[in-house]
Amino acid sequence: MPPPNNTFAEIGALLRGARKIGIVSHLRPDGDALGSVLGLALSLEQAGKEVICLNQDGVPWHLAFMPGSDRILRPDGKVLEIDVAVALDTATKERIGPDCLHALSAAPVLVNMDHHPSNPRYGDFNYVDGGAPAVGEIIFDFLTAEGLPFNDSVRDNLFVAISTDTGSFQYSSTTAHTHEAIAAMMKQGLDSARLSNLLYSQNPMRRVELLRTLLNEMQFRSKGRIASWNYTQETKLRIGVQPGDTEGLIDNLRSIDTVIAAVIFEETRDGTIRVSARSKDDRVDVSAVCAQFGGGGHRLAAGATLQPPIETASTLYLQALEEHVERTA
């Protein structure tokens, strides 16, 4: 059994007692990962702390507008002299990435705050809420409970975190409390319309080309209930994609009326196949299917890594998914 959660008060006391804090999130960061890191970091800085933000893969282009995004550093091989390390939105310690783990290796204490139900609570201090729709919401609650500072930059980052991980408040994980958190920040001056425009209405032409390729190549099975796409290295090179170009792309498959499960199989540079799976039916647990291949995540959003070639990997995964759909839905 994993250890019990620490309280906000315990984590707050630890951070207040620290002078220098390192904050990190998972490989290939999304809006929740970066928004949570920056929201917490900028608040702690206002409270007088020295904060270093790390990510092994850096900031993708579509999130570079986030306040303080230039503060996200990629590790340079040095071990940081810090009092506390904080990992946010990172389901396993390995997902921090080897370079960031090395940079944080001298930290005497690791805090793990997350919303993935599969998180084994690998930190010295842990707060894992598998029911929270976004780690950004957890950070909002933490800052509020601990009376830590908010300013416009903190609010902007937490909005990005919450909006992106709730599918712009469309996913079933969104609760009344989620909207209450956003409403509270709007009362304090949050401009949600401006941020939503920056998040969802600034697509470069190469992303449109990527969408066109997806629509031309997508496949269906289980009487249209499963949609999938094999995203190859050839496609990446032909279009000239950049990190972040696929963010939200799977929602185009998920949005089809007959589809209840959508999957993208991405061929990475080293040949391994990265699986991104989504469900819009609570009966279909894509994390359970991903677990068959060593992956995990949430019931409605999960991932795994498979061995090449992409045709074999996708066939094996889709067979398992189809069996699960036929059995449960």
Image (cartoon, grey):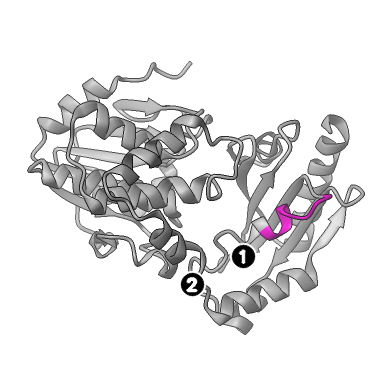
Residue 106 screen position, x and y as percent: 19, 42
> Is residue 268 depicted above or below 234 in this figure?
above
Tell me the kind of residue under disc 1.
Answer: Gly
| Quadrant placement of the C terminus | top right
Residue 54 screen position, x and y as percent: 28, 54
On the rendered structure, is 106 left or right of 185? left
> Is residue 58 depicted above or below 51 in this figure?
below
Label 1 sits on a secondary structure element that is loop
Label 2 sits on a secondary structure element that is loop
Residue at image point 62% right, 59% down:
272
* Residue 25 is inside the magenta segment: no
Residue at image point 39% right, 17% down:
3
Say which residue label 1 marks: 271
- Does residue 101 appear in this view? no
Residue 155 screen position, x and y as percent: 29, 48
On the rendered structure, is 259 left or right of 14? right
> Is residue 89 depicted above or below 73 in this figure?
above
Residue extending furthest toward the front: 187
Say which residue label 2 marks: 202
Residue 240 sits in quarter:
bottom right
Tell me where the magenta segment starts and ends, as one range: 252-258
On the rendered structure, is 85 left or right of 127? left
* Residue 257 is inside the magenta segment: yes
Q: Nearer the viewer, mark 1 or mark 2?
A: 2
Tell me the kind of residue under disc 2.
Answer: Gln
